[in-house]
Amino acid sequence: MNVFRQECKMNFKTALLWILVLCTLGLIFMSFLPLVQKDMKTFLKLMDNFPPALKAVMGIVTDTFSTPLGYYSFAFTFVALCGAIQAMNLGVGIVSKETRDKTADFLLTKPISRTGILSAKISASIVLLAMTAVVYSVIMGFIIRSFSSGDLDIGKYLLVSVTLLFSQVIFYSIGLLVSVTAKKIKAVLPVSLAIVFFFYALSAFAVTSESDKLRFLTPFQYFKPVYIIQNGYYETAYLVTGIAIVIVSVLASYIWFCKKDVHSV
Amino acid sequence: MQLCRIEGGNSRMPNTIEIHNLTKYYGRSRGIVDVSFDVEEGEIFGFIGPNGAGKSTTIRTLLALIYPTSGSASIFGMDCIKDAPKIAKRVGYLPSEVFYYDGMKVKDLLRYSASFYKKDCSKRMKELAGRLDLDLNRKIDDLSFGNKKKVGIVQGLLHSPDLIILDEPTLGLDPLMQQIFFDMIREENERGATVLMSSHILNEVQRICSRVAIIKDGNIIKLEKISTLQETSYKRFKIETHDKLPADTFQIDGVSDLKIEDNTCSFIYRGDINLIVARIAACRIVNLWADEPDLEEIFLHYYSKEV
């Protein structure tokens, strides 16, 4: 419990900062909604000139674009991108920081098993990510409501927003595996940015390709807001893939972390 | 009365640390090879060797920070890898270089450390910090290397461990603090704690330990009582003389690494100090230095021949 508390404490401020970033990002996007609605025609024309790949990556669907929820699903892709960076940072950082700050000797010679340490770190991270998603969803909910004239489908809004947590957990588990298996990570941000943008680029590739199979390669494509809003549920195959990635990464992280030699500095 | 007989019989208390043929390779490079020794309960055991000889590798294996390639070790009769968390409850460890979480105050770190042992350590924390003159309210980032080391010492002793493992403990401590530190270790020992301490400074080990293991190139080359080691003292002499010295002045038994350059002459000496002093007294001396040679030098000129 003490490691869990300590990890929460150490990463709490960063999480607050990310919540602020996500909400601000959402707010900035939503504040353009009245403009979009007013000049819909010009906007649609402008959009038509966008390359289809760009539109697809950003989740722009021209017919629903001027509705609050439709517009939000477009804005949400950017929120999800930021959220992925937050989660990846947390995942890559949480174990590697012990080696980087050379605190591994301290923590790993305490009367707690390695499994116990990793469990505490993972639970603390999940709590922080869940907190991020909940606080974000509530704040963003109020923001969207203020932009819509009472016709907001709260259920669908939440269905979309909560995928922030799902994709974050997937990215987190990938980051965790990287952090546990890497010998030493000198700086977290470059590593996590590289991984996230790799998947983001893959995402652009996936949506422009003919086959849907490529979408399995990038968690950015597992929860498509447009699909969720249209159907009111998630695409099962991708949801299952996401869960599988999390389980495999976390299990592999446990195995690796328990076997790992912790070298002196 | 029956009971006493059984106790005095075959059943033997396990030594605090028992190491059997411990071997560790890092890939293909050597860490330690076939290291075996025991540390008895209640003793202060020194573990010396030049840098890179395998002291830290041995200690880190005992602490389950790294896993042995082959061989095994037990602490308090438990397997040091399998039962690591159980063993850790009764072990205090001071790493050679101490680093702690940034942004934490000294007392926060120490409280965090204490929270692992489920003991109330607040009184002892103040007491230990007081003796080392360590300010509990400072931020760890702002501390000097020596002060960080003090945090490490308090952290290692806080929970009154039964076994104290120290890796190069005096690194970064000034002589005065070293003295206080050794006093503290002695008191812990009198309280009943067993101590295993590694060092590359012979004289430091001589000051406090009762037995030593000497490690070189990953192998234990000698296991000695400190009293035996003390009989043979090593000194490095450097002499500047008025006149040029005849080459054979210091060619006596026990002299190694003899270098003569114009009017200066240097060598390491092992043996009866009186003999060498008599030789030196016969010269017209301009200047004289007598130092403790470092362990590398001793190994190079004495132990390397014995192995």
Image (cartoon, grey):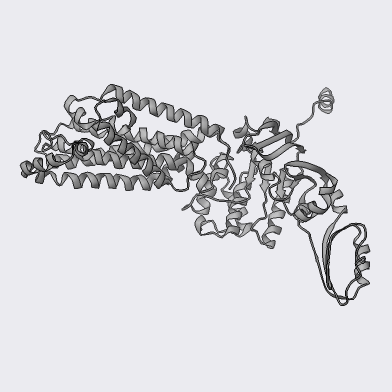
Quadrant for residue A163, please give it.
top left
The C terminus of chain B, quarter of image: top right
Is residue A123 shown left or right of residue A134?
Answer: right
In the rendering, at what x and y percent does residue A182 appear?
A: 49, 39
Point 9% across, 46% down: residue: A35
Point 25% across, 32% down: residue: A207
Residue A70 in sight here: yes
The N terminus of chain B, quarter of image: top right
Is residue A200 shown left or right of residue B142?
Answer: left
In this view, the residue in front, B122 or B70, is B70
In this view, the residue in front, A106 or A111, is A106
Is residue B197 shown left or right of residue A4?
Answer: right
Is residue B210 shown left or right of residue A80?
Answer: right
Residue B162 in sight here: no
Residue B305, compared with residue B24, is above or below; it is below
In this view, the residue in front, A236 or B151, is A236
In the rendering, at what x and y percent does residue A199 appear?
A: 33, 36
Quadrant for residue A5, please give it.
top left
Quadrant for residue B211, please give it.
top right
In the rendering, at what x and y percent does residue B288 appear?
A: 82, 71
Point 94% across, 67% down: residue: B278
In the rendering, at what x and y percent does residue B20 appear?
A: 74, 32
Q: How many marks?
A: 0
